[in-house]
Structures are given as structure tokens and as C-alpha cells.
Amino acid sequence: MRYILNDHNLKLEIMKRILIPTDFSIVADNAIEYALALPKEGVQEVLLLHAGANIDEKFIKLNKQANRLSERFKTEIINSEEPFSSEMIKETINSRFIDFMVMGTSGEEGSITKKIFGNHTSSIIDDLNCPVIVVPVDYVGKGITKIGYASDFTDLEDEAKQVISFAKTFNAAIEVLHVVPVYPDLYDTEKIDIEAKINQIKKKFEYSNIQYVIEETQNDNQIRKGIEQFVEHYTPDLLVMFHQKREDIDKLFSPSATANMITHLEMPLLIFPK
């Protein structure tokens, strides 16, 4: 992602080069449909990545997908003889200067998600080195008018800057969500003026269409439950989360909230690396 800063004003050249991995499955096709609905002015080029043996039948399907995309965006096909893996994806992102990835997801065996990241859902986010929009297989795009941003309120201003820049492309409303109670509470919501902080962010980044909500759960650390409650009430078109890679020892004891959301997706999830 590329930022142009001028004092406190911020403009994001968003989604300039998008990578879409495809294995010709329904899951991958749905990610392509989602990409086709993105604002044309925000996309410079789409790179369609296929991995593995390139037999004639697959080559025909690949060209059909590329032709659909090329009606709207500049499109390039990348053929790799290597099978899909997180390492191959990371190398492609780095070598081709990818700004965003759009991919479908499904928990089913043989899905493109598992081809790339294996059986451990958390690795899909721990291995990210660019923002990714994850599109569930059954999702039918309706545009983006409401964005839910799940936040622990740490790094709020830096994260909000990225979310606002994305939202400006769609002129979408942003609802900032914080789930309580959590332990330890890294950003004690009872001791700060959240409303004043949100108003400060609105003014600094010149975007007024932001609200916030505190979602309470019955027990500590029910992050997924709190997000599900929020989604049911607010019905956003896209959920945004920021993910910080955890040390291997942490993975043994606590599941990632972001990984949990990927497993139970009912709407697209935009994941930014912290």
C-alpha cells in the first residue's frame, strides 16, 4: 500500500496491484467476482496466479478468468510450476510488488485456502506480508457501504488511518468495534475518553462518517462472540481486523481471534498486518 502524506491530510493509492490466486474452484471464482466489483479507479493491475501443472484444460479456464478481469482492469497471468504454498505466495507478493491480495476461503479439504496455507487456519494470517481480503465461498457481493473495524484500541490512530483510506474509496461508513471484557485490557476503555479520541481522528483525517460501539459479552475474552453480536446488529459489508504475528509458543495456548473469524466467515474480511 502506498501513502501520500501532506501535513495531516492523507490520500491512499489503494489496491494498485492486486494478486488473486486461482485453482478454478468455486471459491476462487467467487474471489474474482468480488474483485470485479472493486472501484476501477483504485486498481492499476490484477495479477491472476495459477500454480502447478499447466494442462490445456486449465489453460483455457485461466484465460477465461483473465479475459473477464481484463474487461475492467489491466490483467496479467502468472503461471508457476510450483504448487501453492505460503512461501510461494510471499515470494510472488515481494517480487511483483503486490499491494493487496484477494482470495476465496473455505474450510473444505482441497480448497485453495488449504492448498496455500495448509490445515492450520492461523498460518493464513501469520504469513501475511500485505493486506488481504478474504472472501467466503457463499458470499454474494453487495458493494461496500458499511465497514466494521474490530479494534483493541491499541495503535488506534495508525490503524484508523488505513481503514479510513480504504473507506474513502467507497465513501463507506465506519463503525469501530471494541469487545469487552477482555483480560488483560491493553487499552482500558474505562479510563479514556473514546468519543474524544474518535472525534480527534475524524478531524485529523477529514472523515466524519465514523462511529464506535462497545460490545459486551458475558465472560472475559469472548472476542469472536462479541464480533458476531456486532455483525448481527450492524450488518457491515466488510469486517476489518489487524493481525500481529504471534510467537510459536503463543499458538500452543491461545487461538488467534483473526483465525477464528476466517474459520467462521459469513462476509469478506480485510486483514491488515500490524
Image (cartoon, grey):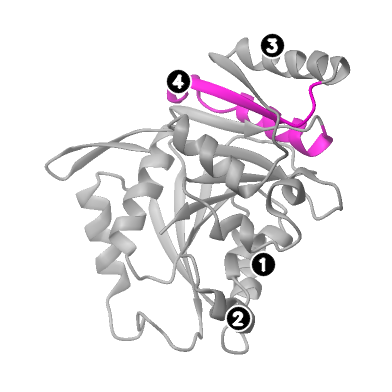
Residue at mark 2: 254
| Label 2, label 1: how far apart the Cα atoms are | 11 Å
Pointer 3 residue = 67
Q: Residues within 10 Å of mark 1 (few under 14, many from 20)?
A: some
Residue 58 in picture, x, y percent from top left: 83, 21
Label 4, secondary structure: give it. Answer: loop
Q: Label 3: few (<14), some or many (≥20) within 10 Å?
A: some
Q: Which residues are magenta?
A: 25-54
> Identity of the amino acid at label 2?
Ser
Q: Nearer the viewer, mark 2 or mark 1?
A: 2
The residue pinned by badge 1 equals 260
Residue at (29% x, 85% y) in the render: 191
Q: Nearer the viewer, residue 200 or 5?
A: 5
* Residue 107 in the image, given as x and y percentages of width and height: 80, 55
Kindly report the distance in space between the C-alpha atoms of the residues bearing marks 4 and 2: 39 Å
Q: Earlier in the sequence, mark 3 or mark 4?
A: 4
Mark 2 or mark 3, earlier in chain: 3
Q: Which residue is mark 4?
A: 44
Q: Secondary structure at mark 1?
A: helix
Label 4 environment density (alpha carbons within 10 Å; few <14, some 14–19, many ≥20): some
